[in-house]
Image (spheres, grey):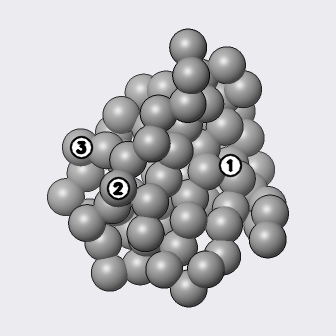
Amino acid sequence: MSQTIAVANSSNIASFAYSPKRSVLTVEFKSGATWEYEEVPELIFEGMKAAESKGSYLAKRIRGYYHGRRIN
């Protein structure tokens, strides 16, 4: 299965993508920063896609729970 990309309707997040093969969530911010979060279950990605506020979902369900690193 290939990477799934979602465009965020968010004030802070430009887009985000998920690689089920690697279990990695990639988040591109409007500031230009890109972060990867490791070992993220697909269910969390689906939750982020469905969330009304992508930024709040990221803050409440991903940051601090999954290892993240800036890649640019």
User: Is there CB contact under 8 Å for labels 2 and 3?
Assistant: no
Circles 1 and 2, Cβ within 8 Å, touching? The answer is no
Q: Quadrant of the C terminus?
A: bottom right
Position of 33 with respect to 41 (left or right) is: right
Q: Position of residue 56 (x, y in %)?
A: 36, 67
Q: How many marks?
A: 3
| Residue corresponding to mark 2 | 7
Q: Which badge, 2 or 3, is on the more N-terminal residue?
A: 2
Choose top left, top right, bottom left or bottom right for residue 22. Answer: top right
Amino acid type at image mark 2: Val
Depth order, front residue of 15/56:
15
Q: Is residue 41 visible?
A: no
Q: Is residue 20 left or right of residue 11?
A: right
Q: What type is the residue that disc 3 sits on?
A: Ala
Identify the secondary structure beneath mark 2. Answer: strand
Give coordinates of residue 52: x percent, y percent: 19, 58
**Which dot, 1 or 2, sits closer to the camera?**
2
Q: Is residue 66 above or below residue 30?
A: above
Q: Is residue 67 left or right of residue 6?
A: right
- The Cα–Cα distance between marks 2 and 3, rounded to whole angstroms, is 12 Å
Q: Which residue is mark 3?
A: 50
Quarter of the image where the N terminus is located: top right
The disc placed on residue 37 is 1
Amino acid type at mark 1: Tyr
Q: Is 11 situated above or below 67?
A: below
- The mark that comes first in sequence, 1 or 2, is 2
